Amino acid sequence: MLIRYKKSLEKIAMGLLSFMPEEKDVKKLQQTIKEYEDNENWLLYLWKEEDILGAIGVRVDDQEKKLMIQHITVNPSHRNSGIGRKMVQEIRELYSEKYFICANDLTNHFLDKCRDNHNQL
Ligand SMILES: CC(C)(COP(=O)(O)OP(=O)(O)OC[C@H]1O[C@@H](n2cnc3c(N)ncnc32)[C@H](O)[C@@H]1OP(=O)(O)O)[C@@H](O)C(=O)NCCC(=O)NCCS
């Protein structure tokens, strides 16, 4: 299930985000985490089973009623078992009534795989 990021999960969240190619640089990674902590429009969720295995980060735009999935990452030892898709599905369940859900350049490739028959996320 998805749980909201909190400061006590900072290390695990940074470890997961660092698997995104654009977040390899530690300074960039620290800025990203800070933005998730400080910016009320940036929301980071973690995928928790017994352990925390994935992260999905979104940015909401209330004016445009748009939610962009801007980070998605799964622990390499647990890939290809559906966690990525399940995280996207839970975000849909939480937000699709209120927001149009979209991807950005960093997440588009995987999110294209998660689209439904109407090509919607
Ligand atoms: C992308 C990622 C989150 C997928 O997580 P996952 O839990 O392995 O995904 P699922 O098990 O739900 O789905 C696996 C499917 O996604 C595909 N996939 C994995 N990474 C992909 C990518 N970057 N682009 C497109 N498809 C991808 C797999 O080939 C597999 O396809 P199949 O169902 O046809 O066999 C994971 O590979 C990851 O953390 N990658 C590194 C971080 C990253 O690059 N994130 C941005 C991706 S655009």
Image (cartoon, rainbow, N blue to C red):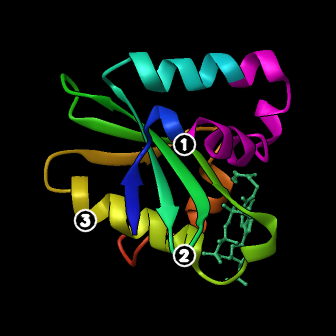
Q: For label 1, count other residues whose C-alpha is less than 10 Å away and answer few (under 14), some (14-19) or many (20+).
A: few
Find out whether residue 93 is within the magenta segment.
no
The residue under the point 82% across, 22% down is 26
Residue 29 occupies quadrant: top right
* Circle number at residue 93: 3
Mark 1 residue element: helix
Q: Quadrant of ligand 1?
A: bottom right
Q: For label 3, count other residues whose C-alpha is less than 10 Å away and answer few (under 14), some (14-19) or many (20+).
A: few
**What is the total number of numbered labels drawn onto the structure image?**
3
Rendered location of residue 70, percent (x, y): 54, 39
Nearer to us: label 3 or label 2 = 2
Residue 7 sits above or below residue 49 on the image = above
Mark 2 residue element: loop
Q: CA distance from mark 1 to mark 3?
A: 24 Å
Nearer to us: label 1 or label 3 = 1
Quickly name the residue at label 2.
50
